[in-house]
Structures are given as structure tokens and as C-alpha cells.
Image (tube, grey):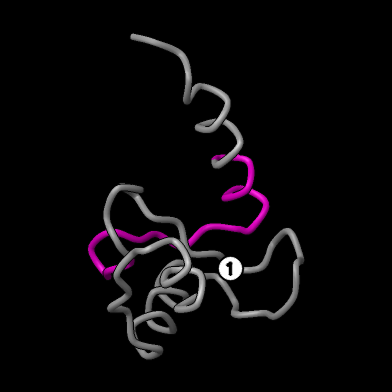
Amino acid sequence: MKHNAKTRGKSFSITLDEFRQLCKETGYIITKGFRGRAASIDRIDNSKGYSIDNIQIMSLRANVKKYHEVDKYADVPF
């Protein structure tokens, strides 16, 4: 996670204990790999970094779907 944040030029201030607590509170079990139900960190506001007040835990599948939905409308003028 830290590596991805650095690659994207985003700050990362979440501790492992905070991440574990958030997973516990939301009912996600921490698993490794690319399983669709694995816990994934989603930034609520993508212009901001990874901080405890700007993240939510969701399934990897839901996070990927959200990314593609947002990306699909990136070039649509308002």
C-alpha cells in the first residue's frame, strides 16, 4: 500500500494497527492475494492521500468496479 501511494505521489499516514482496526470494525478479514472478497483500501477523495479519515475498506472487486466506473466518466464535460 505504501509503495502504491508513493508511486502515485500520495501521502500515506495509516498505521498497520489502524488498518487492522478498520478491517475489524467493517467485518473484513485481512487476506492476501487478488481474491475478489479480499479487503481493499479505497480513498474517499482521490485527490487526497491515504489517511484514516479519507479511506474506507471495501472488497477488492467493489474497489476495482468503482475505479472503472469513475474512470469511464473522466472525460465527460459537465
- Coordinates of residue 37 in the picture (x, y in percent): 69, 62
Q: Is residue 10 above or below residue 74?
A: below
Q: Nearer the viewer, residue 78 or 44?
A: 78
In the image, taking residue 46 as reference, residue 64 lies left or right, namely: right
Coordinates of residue 64 in the picture (x, y in percent)? 63, 48
Kind of element beneath mark 1: strand
Q: Position of residue 41 (x, y in %)?
A: 48, 64
Amino acid residing under circle 1:
Ala
Is 64 situated left or right of 71 in this image? right
Residue name at image x 42 percent, y 72 percent:
6
Q: Residue at x 57, y 50 (%)?
A: 63
**Residue found farthest to the left:** 53
Give, as a single range, the part of the protein colored magenta: 50-66
Using a 10 Å C-alpha cutoff, classify the residue at mark 1 as few (fewer than 14 neighbours), some (14 to 19) or many (20 or more): many
Q: Is residue 2 magenta?
A: no
Task: Give the residue pinned by disc 1.
Answer: 39
Query: What residue appears at the point 30 percent right and 62 percent down from the top-left corner?
Result: 49
Single out the residue that lies furthest toward the top: 78
User: Front-most of 22 and 13?
Assistant: 13
Query: Residue 24's spot in the image, x, y percent?
Result: 45, 78
Q: Is residue 54 left or right of residue 22?
A: left
- 41 over 22 or under it: above or below: above
